[in-house]
Amino acid sequence: MVGFKTVLLHSSHFRTDFKCGKSVLDDYLKFQASQDMKKRLSACFVCVNEELNEPVIAYYTLSNSSISRDFIPLEWQRKFPKSYKTIPTTLLGRLAVDVTFHGKGLGRELLVEALYRSYLASNEIGSVAVVVDPIDDNAQQFYVSYGFQKLPDSGKLFLAMKTIAQLFVS
């Protein structure tokens, strides 16, 4: 989005007024994100005005994760050695846009950016896919519309890194 940039969350970022319509996502940004970053549980990227560096208008989180081999589709299970009981992934834990920016394509832009960051990291740290755990049906529909597939028996969705690579490598 022109005039905005995405950076790692910092204490200077104003987030008190952030409202995306889901209190659990609002509260995470306001009260928990900084602690998770200090503990290296996740990285929180915020979208802010390029000049003012505040207020936060959107954010997403990324972290290393893994999923049980049993939760991935059978055709994918066959691709990995049986000794791998879990498969390394990248977790897109949260993605939220302030209500004043809903419907302007910012969610899509942040998703593409998160996928790109995940792809770049996967070249240095093993990750087979990006996994999301949608907060509700609307979020699930959003991710499915961008190619995410349901993981059997888990409620989570995944997008293979091989598929993501095709978006960014020519």
Image (tube, rainbow, N blue to C red):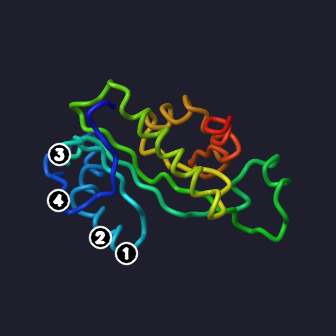
Q: Is residue 104 above or below residue 23?
A: above
Identified by mark 1, the residue type is Lys
Which residue extends farthest bottom? Answer: 39
Judged left or right of residue 135, residue 58 is left
**Are discs 2 and 4 less than 8 Å apart at CB?**
no
Q: In the rendered structure, which disc, 4 or 1, sits on the residue that comes first in sequence?
A: 4
Q: CA distance from mark 4 to mark 3?
A: 9 Å
Q: CA distance from mark 2 to mark 4?
A: 15 Å
Q: Which residue is mark 3?
A: 55
What's the residue at 26%, 30% (across, down)? 101
Identified by mark 3, the residue type is Pro
Q: Which disc is residue 156 wearing? A: none
Q: CA distance from mark 1 to mark 2?
A: 6 Å
Q: Which residue is mark 2?
A: 35
Q: Which residue is mark 1?
A: 39
- Disc 2 secondary structure class: helix
Q: Which mark is nearer the camera, 4 or 1?
A: 4
**Are discs 1 and 2 less than 8 Å apart at CB?**
yes
What's the residue at 27%, 55% (across, down)? 29
Q: Is residue 151 above or below residue 123?
A: above
Q: From the viewer's side, name the closer residue of 62 and 87.
A: 62
The part of the image, by quadrant, that contains residue 68 is bottom right
Q: Which mark is nearer the camera, 2 or 4?
A: 4
**Are discs 4 and 1 less than 8 Å apart at CB?**
no
What's the residue at 41%, 40% (across, down)? 110
Q: In the rendered structure, which disc, 4 or 3, sits on the residue that comes first in sequence?
A: 4
Q: Which disc is residue 12 wearing? A: 4
